[in-house]
Image (spheres, rainbow, N blue to C red):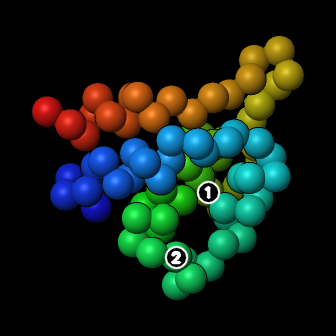
Amino acid sequence: MVRHHPEALLSEMRLQLVSRDDFRRLRAAHPNDLTDIQRTARFVAVQRMAYGGKPDCSSFPVRPSHPKTFDAGVLRSLTLP
């Protein structure tokens, strides 16, 4: 998905929020209810937000003094030539 449809994925993730509520919502979303693009965006976001990239872990490792952000530009640099 990332290789063949990077712009669609970036568009889906452009406004992705990084919060405990969104982390829980994304983890609870059933993959069969999502499109391929949404499923890929969910995977990337949960991996980015989960402690140590472990989506089974319920820990959301953010401190108020060091807010975590999701930078879609990093994904763009990895997917586009």
* Mark 2 or mark 1, earlier in chain: 2
Q: What amino acid does circle 2 point to?
A: Leu
Q: Residue furthest top?
A: 65
* Of the two numbered discs 2 and 1 in the rendering, the one whose residue sits closer to the viewer: 2
Determine which residue is flagged by label 2: 34
Give the position of the N terminus as an image quadrant: bottom left
Circle 2 packing at 10 Å, graded few (<14), some (14-19), many (20+), is few
Looking at the rendered structure, the secondary structure element under dot 1 is: loop
Residue 11 percent location from the top left of the image: 43, 48
C-alpha distance separating marks 2 and 1: 18 Å
| Residue at image point 19% right, 58% down | 4
| Residue at image point 37% right, 36% down | 75
Q: Residue furthest right?
A: 64
Residue 57 percent location from the top left of the image: 70, 55
- Whether residue 26 sits left or right of residue 58 in the image: it is left
| Residue at image point 52% right, 76% down | 34
Residue 64 percent location from the top left of the image: 85, 22
Is residue 53 in sight in this rendering? no
Is residue 56 in sight in this rendering? yes
Question: Image quarter for residue 77?
Answer: top left
| Residue at image point 74% right, 52% down | 22
Question: Image quarter for residue 80?
Answer: top left
Q: What amino acid does circle 1 point to?
A: Pro
Circle 1 packing at 10 Å, graded few (<14), some (14-19), many (20+), is some
Check whether the beta carbons of the residues at disc 2 and disc 1 lie within 8 A of each other.
no
Residue 51 percent location from the top left of the image: 66, 42
Q: Residue furthest left?
A: 81
Give the answer, above or below, for where 6 lies relative to 34.
above
- Whether residue 15 sits left or right of residue 24 in the image: it is left
Determine which residue is flagged by label 1: 55
Give the answer, above or below, for where 31 lies relative to 27.
below
